[in-house]
Image (cartoon, rainbow, N blue to C red):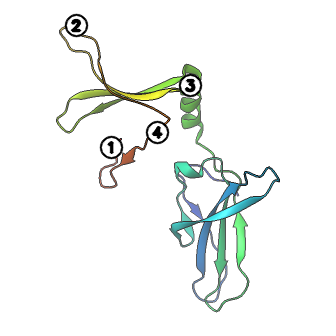
Amino acid sequence: VGGLLGTPLKASGEFVGTPEATWFRQRSSLTGRGEDRFVPLGAAQGLEYLPTADDVGAVLRLECVGPYGGKPVAVETSPIALDPPTHAELEAFLRKGQAEFHAFTPQQEARIVLVTRKNIKVRSKSSRMGGGASTLYKQGYQRPVTAVVDEHSPQEMAL
């Protein structure tokens, strides 16, 4: 059983009643002993799961227990992969050493978000009067960088 980012995983089976289903993501051990463990995906319940970017490269496991108990029945995926166009785009960014994204502020001011191997920058776009782009925000990766996508508007995010 494989899986692609953005493609729902659906399980089915024969149970008496509705089973309790729990999804897990594999996390490799840092001990180097080949010990892998599966961590529950808290919000993922039910027989269907939509893999996220956090799942890429990881093996997922679904465990089901019938409503009357018993031993769990489990199935594992192969590592979750990117779809070929997204994989090719990511490889191009890695070869180039940076990725550039065009964005707008809530006031509709054009911005460039530049993600490099060293840092992340937010730049103003160059003006029509010949002025160059200027850096408005720059942060190295010594401190965590988080981008949060608005759940009600997937076109909006905050750094």
Q: Between marks 4 and 1, how big is the CA–CA gap? A: 16 Å
Q: Quadrant of residue 41?
A: bottom right
Q: Between marks 3 and 1, how big is the CA–CA gap? A: 25 Å
Give the residue number, with chain letter if any, for mark 3. 92
In the image, what residue occupies the spot 46% across and 28% down?
119
Residue 26, compared with residue 81, is above or below; it is: below
The secondary element bearing badge 4 is classed as loop
Question: In the image, residue 52 lies at what x, y percent?
Answer: 52, 52
Give the residue number, with chain letter if any, for mark 1. 158
Tell me which label, 4 or 3, sits earlier in the chain. 3
Quarter of the figure with the C terminus: top left
Tell me which label, 1 or 2, sits earlier in the chain. 2
Density class for disc 3 (Cα within 10 Å; few <14, some 14-19, many ≥20) is few
The secondary element bearing badge 2 is classed as loop
Q: Seen from this angle, which residue lies furthest front?
A: 142
Tell me which label, 3 or 1, sits earlier in the chain. 3
Give the residue number, with chain letter if any, for mark 2. 130
Q: Between marks 4 and 3, how big is the CA–CA gap? A: 26 Å
Name the amino acid type tagged 2: Gly
Residue 11 placement, left or right of 153: right
| Whether label 1 touches label 2, CB < 8 Å | no
Give the residue number, with chain letter if any, for mark 4. 143
The secondary element bearing badge 3 is classed as helix
